[in-house]
Amino acid sequence: MTATIQETSGLRRLTAQDRRRFRRVILSTNARCMWSRGVEFRATTVDLCAGGLSLKTDQPYELGEELIIYVEDLGRLVGTVARSTAFGFAVTFQLVPKKREKIADMLTWMINKNALNLDDERNSKRRTFGGSLLVTFENGVVSQCDVVDLSLTGVGLKTSGVKPPIGAVVKIGSRLGRCSRYIDNGFAVEFT
């Protein structure tokens, strides 16, 4: 998945008519979405900010409907459909202040990393890792998974079996974590 950011400054100038609480970054990347009723769909981000995003999709929706969105580099976001757009709909995030600040920081990073030739500064560096391990799901099902990468804060796992639901608690050895997102042929776990 590759994100593209508008090359100018990455920020859109807003008119008085389009004034928003947060500045929006024009960003086109794939998003995986799931309605609160469990229906999943894919969309493309059009722009986003610390307060919400616009999605390009022909997925039917209702104003006020809640959904979970997974955006590359930003992770899991929860929001509600705020309004219709010409290409889909806009979502207002339901975030605690700390998460909102993290999103703003990530957007700033995404805008500046190419322009300033910056390196990735994750909290915990990811290491590729071979081998397999057993993962126990909340319902007691045990699945053998291959480790894709590993860091102090989480692990990427490849599986040919069932994936746990997003947000589900899993046990890896003696460590607990939550399924944070799906990856190609597997899922990622953030340790708790």
Image (spheres, rainbow, N blue to C red):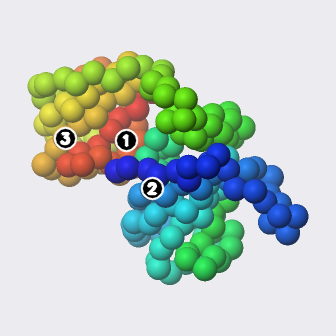
Residue 137: which quarter of the image? top left
Q: Position of residue 151 (x, y in %)?
A: 34, 22
The answer to whether one can see residue 51 in this image is no
User: In the image, what residue type sits under mark 2?
Assistant: Thr
| Mark 1–mark 3 distance (CA, rounded to whole Å) | 13 Å
Q: Which mark is residue 179?
A: 1
Q: Position of residue 42 (x, y in %)?
A: 40, 66
Quick check: marks 1 and 3 in contact, CB under 8 Å?
no
At 73% across and 50% down in the image, what residue appears? Answer: 23
Which three-letter amino acid code belongs to the residue tagged 3? Lys
Categorize mark 1 by other alpha carbons within 10 Å: few (<14), some (14-19), many (20+). many
Please indicate whether residue 161 sits to the left or right of residue 182 in the image.
left
Q: Residues within 10 Å of mark 3 (few under 14, many from 20)?
A: many
Q: Which is nearer the eye, 168 or 180?
A: 180
Mark 2 Cα within 10 Å, few/some/many (few <14, many 20+)?
some
Name the residue rendered at 51%, 43% in the picture.
74
Identified at 65% across, 77% down, the residue is 84
Amino acid type assigned to the residue bearing label 1 in the image: Cys
Report the residue marked by disc 2: 29
Q: CA distance from mark 2 to mark 3?
A: 23 Å
Identify the mark nearer the N-term, 1 or 2: 2
**Residue 133 percent across, percent down from the top left:** 16, 28
The residue to which callout 3 is attached is 158
Query: For the residues carrying marks 1 and 3, which lies nearer the camera in this image?
Result: 3
Viewer-proximal residue among 150 and 177: 150
Tell me if residue 144 comes above or below residue 16 in the rendering: above
Check the image and report above or below for 40 versus 63. Answer: above
